[in-house]
Structures are given as C-alpha cells and as structure tokens.
C-alpha cells in the first residue's frame, strides 16, 4: 500500500504478507470463537467460589460474569479521577498540537483492495454476530 516496501527484498515482503495473513486469521478465529455451556458454568462456579473467598457480593460477581452492571451499584468519580483524566487529555492535546501530517505516497488500487477485503470481513463478522446473539 505504501512505497516503503517497493524496494524491499522478497524475503521482507514474504514476512510482511505472512504476518498480515496470520494476524487477520487470528482476529477471525477470536471473532468467531465461543464457549460451551459447560465451560460457561465452570466460569460461573469459579467466580462464585472466588467471590465467597474474598467476600464479594454474589450479585456483583454474577453480573460481572454476565457482562452487565450489578443492580444497586453506582460509581462516582473522585477529584483524583478527574485530575488524572484532565492530565492525560492535556498530554494528548499537546502531542496532537505538535504532530505534523506525514508525507506518504498512497497506492490507491491497493487501498481500494484493502477496503473491499475489510468490508467483506466486517460483513461476515456482522452475520456471525447476528447468528450468535441476534444483537441482544
């Protein structure tokens, strides 16, 4: 996609392409993976056991396992939280102000091909997610 690889050796190109394919396959495997009911039950049992061990509210533990917020919990931010957020945001703004746009020559045909592949992956992952969760 960029001209950096135009003069690269075939070995470097093989590594770049191979690494990209392996990462894409790994992302696909992760996106399409699921656990069995028995595995999920063991996970819940383990969470309950550890919750009892450390005296954590069982509702809080089961809500965390289910991926939801426990009823009756309300999180408030302290002044220290806001100081950290403001400091981190200030650092990001300062770096953004110093940043300059890099001069990169783009190969539009490769970018279009990559966009088509990414849209295909997006569609297939969306279909898999719909089949699994019905977006609920």
Image (cartoon, grey):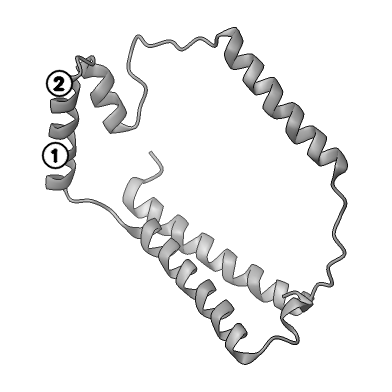
- Residue 85 percent across, percent down from the top left: 65, 22
Q: How many marks?
A: 2
Residue 115: name its quadrant.
Answer: bottom right
Q: Is residue 64 left or right of residue 26?
A: left
- Residue 49 percent across, percent down from the top left: 13, 27
Q: Residues within 10 Å of mark 1 (few under 14, many from 20)?
A: few
Task: Quarter of the image for the C terminus: give it.
Answer: top left
- Residue 38 percent across, percent down from the top left: 11, 46
Reading the chain from its start, which is encountered first: label 1 or label 2?
A: 1
Pointer 2 residue: 53
Instruction: Compare residues 10 and 32 and report the one nearer the observer.
Output: 10
Marking on residue 16: none
Residue 117: name its quadrant.
Answer: bottom right
- Residue 134 percent across, percent down from the top left: 37, 46
Pointer 1 residue: 41
Quick one: SS at disc 1?
helix
Task: Quarter of the image for the N terminus: give it.
Answer: bottom right
Residue 57: name its quadrant.
Answer: top left
| Above or below for 118 versus 6 | above
Tell me whether the residue at label 1 lies in contact with that at label 2, contact meaning CB atoms closer than 8 angstroms.
no
Q: Is residue 40 left or right of residue 77?
A: left
| Above or below for 22 versus 64 | below
Instruction: Compare residues 123 and 87 and report the one nearer the observer.
Output: 87
Quick one: SS at disc 2?
helix
Residue at 62%, 91% in the rendered image: 10
């Amino acid at each position: 996609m960029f001209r950096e690889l135009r003069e690269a050796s075939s070995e470097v190109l093989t590594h770049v392409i191979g690494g990209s394919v392996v990462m894409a396959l790994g992302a696909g495997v992760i996106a399409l993976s699921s656990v069995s009911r028995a595995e999920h039950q063991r996970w819940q049992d383990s969470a309950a056991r550890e919750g009892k061990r450390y005296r954590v509210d069982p509702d809080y533990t089961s809500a965390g396992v289910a991926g939801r917020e426990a009823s009756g919990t309300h999180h408030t931010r302290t002044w220290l939280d806001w100081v950290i957020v403001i400091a981190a945001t200030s650092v990001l703004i300062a770096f953004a102000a110093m940043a300059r746009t890099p001069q990169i020559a783009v190969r539009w045909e490769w970018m279009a091909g990559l966009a088509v592949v990414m849209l295909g992956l997006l569609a297939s992952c969306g279909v898999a997610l719909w089949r699994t969760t019905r977006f609920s």
